[in-house]
Amino acid sequence: MTVVILGCGYTGEHVARRMMRYRSRVICTSRDITRLARLRDAELIALDTTKPFSLDFVPSESLVLHSIPPPGNSDPEAIVTALGDRPKRLVYLSTRVFTAISAMSLNYRVPRRCTSGIGKDCEWKRLS
């Protein structure tokens, strides 16, 4: 399983460590990746969403923790749009992020039926 943490701050570091203990591949982004030097086993990618950016590094079917608040007057949908259909699951961490996107019309994927626990072996349905 691959976990991508967009905007890896205090909470993201704790999530990254826990997921690495479960032997997950972890990709962390930050504007300043030197702050993430303690995450030696994670893949670190510099990402500044206040400038043109790409999320092409996000693998298909990955789990994404989105913790980047939209800067100023920028498009609050930019990150979700850049992710496209790649994530298997997308989780918003910051209340500022959620406030900014709460009015957006996102296509959420929800499990229709799971046979072996939460998120495992699920048949997914897209809501619009």
Image (cartoon, grey):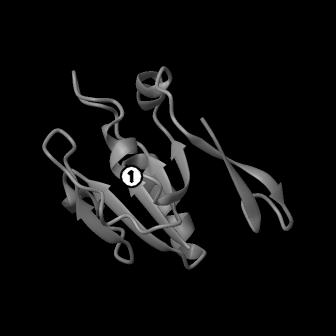
Tell me: residue 91, above or below residue 116.
Answer: above
Which residue is at a point 43% across and 61% down the rendered structure image?
A: 4
Residue 78 image offset from top left, x and y in percent? 31, 38
Q: Secondary structure at mark 1?
A: helix
Residue with the mark numbered 1: 83
Relative to 38, 116 lies left or right: right
Residue 106 image offset from top left, x and y in percent? 51, 34
- Label 1: how many Cα within 10 Å (few below 14, some 14–19, many 20+): some
Residue 126 image offset from top left, x and y in percent? 64, 46
- The count of marks equals 1
Res 107 → quadrant: top right
Relative to 111, 109 lies left or right: left
Using the rendered image of the protein, determine whether residue 8 is visible from the camera's viewpoint. Answer: no
Q: Quadrant of the C terminus?
A: top right
| Nearer-the-camera pick, 97 or 62 | 62
| Nearer-the-camera pick, 75 or 43 | 75
Tell me: residue 94, above or below residue 102.
Answer: below
Which residue is at a point 75% across and 60% down the rendered structure image?
A: 123
Res 26 → quadrant: bottom left
| Nearer-the-camera pick, 56 or 26 | 56
* Residue at the right extreme of this rendering: 115
Tell me: residue 36, above or below residue 25.
Answer: above
Which residue is at a point 55% across and 67% down the rendered structure image?
A: 19
Residue 49 image offset from top left, x and y in percent? 22, 43
Using the rendered image of the protein, determine whether residue 106 is visible from the camera's viewpoint. Answer: yes
| Nearer-the-camera pick, 38 or 8 | 8
Q: Quadrant of the N terminus?
A: bottom right
Which residue is at a point 59% across and 41% down the rendered structure image?
A: 108
Amino acid type, callout 1 = Leu
